[in-house]
Image (cartoon, rainbow, N blue to C red):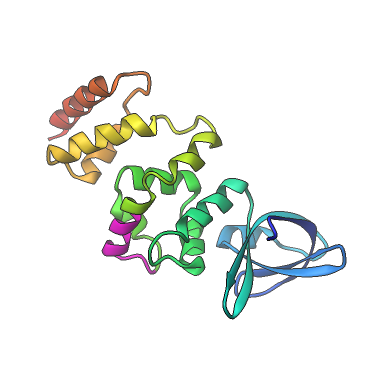
Amino acid sequence: MIGYLSGKLIYREANGTVTIEVGGVGYRVLMKTSSFAQCQSSDESVQVWTHTYVKEDALSLYGFETIEERDCFEVLIQAHGVGPALALGILSVHSVQDLSSAVAQRDLTALMQVPGVGRKTAERLVIELESRLEGIVAPLNATLSIDFGKMGEVRQALLGLGFSGEEIKSVVGELLPSDSTQDMIKKALSRLKRVS
């Protein structure tokens, strides 16, 4: 299994594939849209984290700028009905943190911005990815302002009270991660009542 490549960019294809020469061997690597766009000129040095995808009739390499992107891709392709092309499409539209936030907040509208993701697929992604993405996002850095465990409980409580995902999303950014779950729920309810 090939997990990382560091070499020279020698060719770009219109379909989002680049060829990277490493030790005299050219590896064809499929990349998400923004990563592909950054690979501009031949002979530039590139480094990518890779996932080796094997099926009966093909062996493909998918390349990512960070190990977190690669790990997220690997989680996505484990979800029911999500193949490598759709997983790459999701990461072309959403960063790892944005995807995790959309899943955590059950923001189906954000997930449906991805071509090929309808409401049913978005709902299934929320269910399947909610716990799986925590291990990827937690080590990234502290930029997510709310603890996933607490936020999950807050979200579930608010959903149980009949608030929509959009309403919940509008107030979660104001909550403090240092507060207890109970205090976060109280503050969210207070803000939601003020808005309505």
- Where's residue 100, x and y in %? 42, 45
Q: Is residue 82 left or right of residue 20?
A: left
* Whether residue 71 can be seen here: yes
Magenta run includes residue 68:
no
Q: In the rendering, at what x and y percent does residue 182 appear? A: 23, 22
* Part of the protein shown in magenta: 116-125
Viewer-closest of 195 and 105: 105
At a point 21% along the width and 40% down the height, the residue shown is 167
- Dominant secondary structure of the magenta stretch? helix
x 13%, y 30%: residue: 193
Nearest to the observer: residue 152 or residue 34: 152
Taking the spot 30% from the left edge, 65% from the top edge, the residue there is: 118
Asked if one can make out residue 173 in the rendered structure from this viewpoint, the answer is no
Q: Where is residue 126 in the image (x, y as percent from the top left)?
A: 33, 52
Q: Is residue 178 left or right of residue 27?
A: left
Q: Which of 117 and 38 is in front in this view?
A: 117
Q: Viewed as shown, does residue 162 lie left or right of 177?
A: left
User: Which quadrant would residue 184 be assigned to in this image?
Assistant: top left
Vertical arrangement, residue 3 with respect to residue 89, above or below:
above
Q: Does the magenta stretch include residue 124?
A: yes
Q: In which quarter of the image is the N terminus?
A: bottom right
**Image vertical order of residue 38 relative to residue 190, above or below:** below
Relative image position of residue 49 (x, y in whole percent): 66, 53
Question: To which quarter of the image does residue 116 belong?
Answer: bottom left
